[in-house]
Amino acid sequence: MPAEDETVAEDASIELAVPTSEEADVEVEREQDAPEPAELDPETRARRDAALRHVRKLGDPVLRATALPVERFDEALQTEIERMGVLMHDALGVGLAATQLGVLHRVLVYRAYPEDPLTALVNPEMTWMSDEQETAEEGCLSLPSVHVEVERSARVRVVAKDAGGDDLEIEAEGLEARIIQHEIDHLNGVLILDRISRQARKEAMRAMREAQSAPSAA
C-alpha cells in the first residue's frame, strides 16, 4: 500500500486538468464487501477521506463533459494512471474515470475484485454489448447514501490501449462488465441518475439531501 504522503500529494501538472469548482463532486463505487464508512478504522477512514478530496463532486461541470482521446503515451500518462489507481484504492473504489479527477482524458481504471490486478483502459470503445440485460444496485460516492438499481448489458466487449499504447481487447461479464460500462459513461458525461426513472431519481436526490443535512457522526 502506498505511503499516505504519496496518496494525498497534489499533481499540479496533469494536462487538460479542469479547475475544481466550489461545488466539486466525487464518484467512486465502494469495493465489493468493503465496510460501510461508519465501520472503518481511523487510519482507513483518513486515507479514504484524503483520496475523496481529489475527486470531483456532483454539480461540477466536468462530470458532464466528454473526455478527449489520449494521443501521447508517455511518462506523464503512466503517472496519471498510477495516481488514479492509488486514489481508487484508498477511496475503497472499484473504478475511476479521469474526468472524476477533473482531467479530460479518455482513461479509466478498475479492479473488480481485490485479488485482481489494476486494469487501465485508454481510449476505450465498446464494440459489442449483449442483448441480455441485468439489473443490479450501483452506488456512487458523489451521491451520498444513494444506491439505485441500474439496468446494463450482462456482457460486453471493449477495445482500448494500455498505458504503453498497446492494443487491448477485453470481454467481460457480471461485475466487471458493469464497472466498465459505468466508467465509460463517466467519460461521456453520463451519471447513474441518467439511467433510472424520473421517480427513482427524485427519491435518490431526496435521500442525498437527507444524508447531507444529517449531523456528522463523531
Image (cartoon, rainbow, N blue to C red):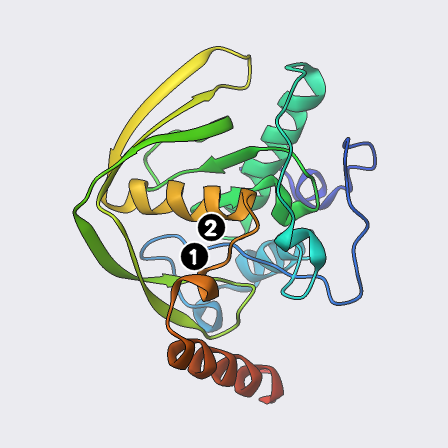
In the image shown, does 10 or 145 lie closer to the viewer?
Answer: 145
> Can you see residue 55?
no
Q: Does the rendering let one see residue 107?
A: yes
Which residue is nearer to you in this view: 4 or 137? Answer: 137
Q: Which residue is mark 2?
A: 93
At 54% across and 83% down in the image, what residue appears? 211
Q: Amino acid at mark 1?
A: Arg
Image location (x, y in percent) of residue 57: 65, 62
Left or right relative to 50: residue 169: left
State the image coordinates of residue 21 (x, y, percent, origin top left).
79, 60
Q: Residues within 10 Å of mark 1 (few under 14, many from 20)?
A: many
Amino acid on which the number 2 mark rests in the picture: Gly
Q: Residue 41: x and y, percent?
A: 50, 63
Q: Quadrant of residue 47?
A: bottom right
Q: Nearer the viewer, residue 218 or 28?
A: 28
Expressed as whole percent of the image width and height from the top left, the position of residue 150 reads 32, 61
Q: Earlier in the sequence, mark 1 or mark 2?
A: 1
Residue 30, numbered label: 1
**Kind of element beneath mark 2:** loop
Q: Is residue 207 left or right of residue 18?
A: left
Secondary structure under the numbered disc 1 in the rendered image: loop
93 to 121, vertically: above or below: below
Callouts 1 and 2 close, C-beta under 8 Å: yes
State which quarter of the image contains the C terminus: bottom right
The structure residue drawn at horizontal position 63% and vertical position 65%, both measured from the top left corner, is 58
